């Protein structure tokens, strides 16, 4: 047993897990508001990271300026996507809606690879120090930043949905569209808003991952990794998304540890979450916190 | 009756037999037979003069084996209403299974293709077990997971797939006669396509086929009527995997080499794209959609080679990025079809037929 390694991996898992949690939250937000399963969530990260990278390297903008411009761009992008592509799909069968987002996902993936190439591009250095000492562990400052930002976003989400007018309107929409409409809430605006927020926050996560690992098309795999997290937490629960993300993040790293120490099968890191996913779907398809739908004839 | 030979405008069917018949008029049957005969003439070569260029033969073979797998997916998605994001894994499993059965156990290729289909059926039914409990988007996510698990299995199971080196497959042979070259292999694929499509059409006219459609349209009513949901959902997975396995096996013996790369999520999405572009719930639609999906990149290639001689032709972004443009066009085609023609090419084809049937009066 290598306790130190295990500890390091669990810390890594927590950090990655909070990022999964953030992306899963964005995913859940869209699902709750508009009942659309967004298979293009990973591409939001990808687009956000590439746009920010492009602004920083081509125009030599300072980080905060490029970052804010990226967020503004992603907001417009999310709204446009909802209005142009997803709005015509309202009322279509579930397979069509799923396929539209899948189609969008491979479309954007290809466009991004076309525009920016397939190689990993490092972000310009933001921090001067190489590593920070936390409880005797060497942690990259970018990781710390990602942890802080993730926790900050989660807090922001909680505040937004609990106290702000817009957040309450969104929750009302998710609860019952007709009732919300009769209370004067514009459903169209709420749908567009949820996509905009989701795109913005995903892009933020994308930039954070980009700062840590460099930007590449591998970022879009986050969109797929998020499925085990949201299913585990329950598809329509924001708290569940965070918890699910944390569990999956730790699980991945523990799987890597178990694999490296005893099993030596290799690649368990990527596949283990999917085994978990199938097991959850078999025994508890509505996840830990999801609402169980009861069908009556 | 003489009036029976022409298609009439309107539904005048008085029996179930007339309603479920494959070819409503003798002419439509004759045209279908004529189409197969014309296809059979395509690979003929008179000395140096070939009726159809080699390149188009390879494209038609591709449409053939992918079309078989696409029909399987259409039975699952279009007729039973279950979404599968893991079809390419079954396609790959069939390819490896046939190569393995032939190489290791020495089973002749003719039988190994069939056995590979059955083996894939078994795997498909195991993967389909969650379908007994979950449906809709949960099932889509479960099949997505099984896609990754099977892909991981391919890269891990050296005994089965040859690992990163891939595995070699023998050429197709029947009664000791070895098929050589694409032009001869074309006939093999043609026979399989015709047989599998006839099987598929007839399956959907049978009791089981009606049960599939009932499960798709309203599963609660279907269950009340006595359709065993779990059985038919898993059976549908099995049948779709059988088609995928046969298609994959044909692919393996065509290329004579199977690599573990390529049976990824992108191919699964392409299969779904074929089914959607062709038309969900249409047998011939699967073939049309496959043809569209195979020909789309070819059209782009042709477009670029036309551009080559103009001033547009030397832009590196277009020439180097062609792979990405092709991939993007697949995604774009799926999205545009879903927004503007959700019922697919098969529906378009019916509209064209209806238009000419009533020509020159619109109703």
Image (cartoon, helix red, strand yellow):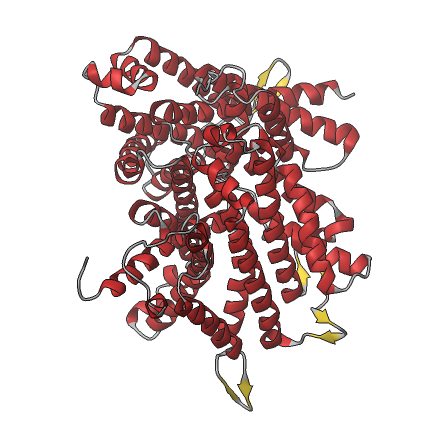
Residue sitting farthest toward the bottom? B47
Identify the residue shown where x is 50% and y is 71%: B36
- Where residue B216 appears, as percent x and y from the top left, is 46, 37
- Where residue B102 appears, as percent x and y from the top left, is 76, 60
User: Is residue B196 among what the camera can see?
Assistant: yes
Residue A267, above or below B51 = above
- Where residue B155 appears, as percent x and y from the top left, is 69, 46
Residue A40, above or below B52 = above
Judged left or right of residue A159, residue A84 is left
User: Is residue A12 among what the camera can see?
Assistant: no
Judged left or right of residue A206, residue A11 is right
Judged left or right of residue B283, residue B93 is right
Q: Quadrant for the C terminus of chain A, please.
A: top left
Residue sitting farthest toward the top? A163
> Which quadrant would residue A279 be assigned to in this image?
top right
Most foreground residue, A230 or B186: B186
> Which quadrant would residue B109 be assigned to in this image?
bottom right
Identify the residue shown where x is 72% and y is 52%: B161
Residue A262, above or below B272 = above
Q: Quadrant for the N terminus of chain A, please.
A: top right
Most foreground residue, A100 or B113: B113
- Where residue A26 appears, as percent x and y from the top left, is 41, 25
Most foreground residue, A261 or B183: B183
Residue sitting farthest toward the front? B1
């Amino acid at each position: 047993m290598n306790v130190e390694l295990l500890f390091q991996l669990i810390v890594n898992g927590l950090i990655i897990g909070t990022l999964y949690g953030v992306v899963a939250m964005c995913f859940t937000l869209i699902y709750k508001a508009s009942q659309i399963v967004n298979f293009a969530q990973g591409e939001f990260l990808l687009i956000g990271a590439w746009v920010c990278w492009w602004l920083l390297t081509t125009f030599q903008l300072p980080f905060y300026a490029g970052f804010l411009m990226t967020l503004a761009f992603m907001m417009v992008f999310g709204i446009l996507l909802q209005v142009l592509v997803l709005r015509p799909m309202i009322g279509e069968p579930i397979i069509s809606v799923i396929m539209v987002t899948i189609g969008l996902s491979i479309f954007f993936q290809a466009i991004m690879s076309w525009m920016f190439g397939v190689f990993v591009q490092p972000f310009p250095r933001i921090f001067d120090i190489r590593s920070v000492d936390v409880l005797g562990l060497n942690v990259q400052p970018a990781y710390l930043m990602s942890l802080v930002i993730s926790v900050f976003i989660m807090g922001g989400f909680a505040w937004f949905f609990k106290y702000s007018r817009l957040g309450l309107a969104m929750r009302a929409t998710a609860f019952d569209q007709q009732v919300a409409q009769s209370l004067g809430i514009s459903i169209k605006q709420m749908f567009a808003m949820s996509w905009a927020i989701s795109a913005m926050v995903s892009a933020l996560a994308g930039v954070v991952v980009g700062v840590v690992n460099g930007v590449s098309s591998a970022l879009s795999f986050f969109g797929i990794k998020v499925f085990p997290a949201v299913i585990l937490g329950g598809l329509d629960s924001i708290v569940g998304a965070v918890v699910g993300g944390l569990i999956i993040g730790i699980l991945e790293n523990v799987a890597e540890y178990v694999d490296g120490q005893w099993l030596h099968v290799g690649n368990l890191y990527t596949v283990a979450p999917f085994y978990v996913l199938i097991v959850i779907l078999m025994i508890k398809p509505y996840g830990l916190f999801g609402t169980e739908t009861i069908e009556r004839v | 009756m003489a009036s029976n030979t022409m298609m009439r405008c309107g539904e005048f069917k008085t029996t179930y037999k007339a309603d479920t018949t494959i070819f409503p008029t003798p002419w439509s049957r004759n045209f279908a037979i004529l189409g197969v005969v014309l296809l059979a003439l395509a690979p003929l070569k008179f000395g140096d003069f070939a009726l159809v260029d080699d390149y188009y033969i390879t494209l038609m073979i591709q449409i053939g084996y992918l079309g078989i797998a696409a029909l399987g997916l259409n039975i699952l998605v279009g007729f039973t209403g279950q979404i599968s994001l893991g079809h390419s894994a079954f396609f790959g499993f069939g390819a490896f299974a046939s190569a393995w059965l032939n190489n290791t156990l020495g089973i002749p290729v003719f039988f190994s293709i069939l056995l590979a289909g059955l083996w894939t059926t078994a795997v498909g039914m195991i993967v389909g077990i969650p379908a007994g409990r979950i449906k809709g988007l949960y099932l889509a996510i479960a099949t997505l997971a099984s896609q990754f698990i099977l892909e991981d299995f391919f890269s891990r199971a050296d005994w089965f797939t040859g690992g990163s080196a891939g595995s070699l497959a023998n050429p197709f042979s029947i009664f000791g006669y070895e098929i050589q070259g694409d032009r001869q292999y074309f006939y093999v694929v043609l026979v399989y396509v015709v047989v599998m499509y006839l099987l598929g059409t007839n399956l959907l006219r049978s009791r089981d086929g009606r049960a599939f459609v009932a499960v798709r349209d309203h599963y609660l009513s279907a269950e009340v009527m006595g359709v065993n949901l779990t059985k038919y959902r898993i059976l549908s997975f099995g049948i779709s995997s059988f088609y995928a396995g046969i298609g994959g096996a044909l692919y393996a013996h065509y290329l004579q080499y199977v690599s573990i790369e390529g049976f990824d999520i992108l191919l699964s999405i392409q299969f779904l794209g074929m089914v959607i572009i062709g038309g969900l719930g249409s047998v011939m639609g699967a073939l049309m959609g496959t043809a569209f999906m195979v020909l789309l990149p070819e059209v782009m290639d042709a477009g670029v080679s036309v551009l080559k001689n103009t001033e547009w032709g030397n832009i590196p972004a277009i020439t180097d990025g062609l792979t990405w443009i092709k991939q993007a066009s697949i995604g774009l085609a799926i999205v545009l079809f879903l927004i503007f023609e959700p019922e697919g090419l098969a529906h378009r084809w019916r509209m064209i037929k209806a238009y000419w049937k009533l020509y020159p009066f619109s109703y």
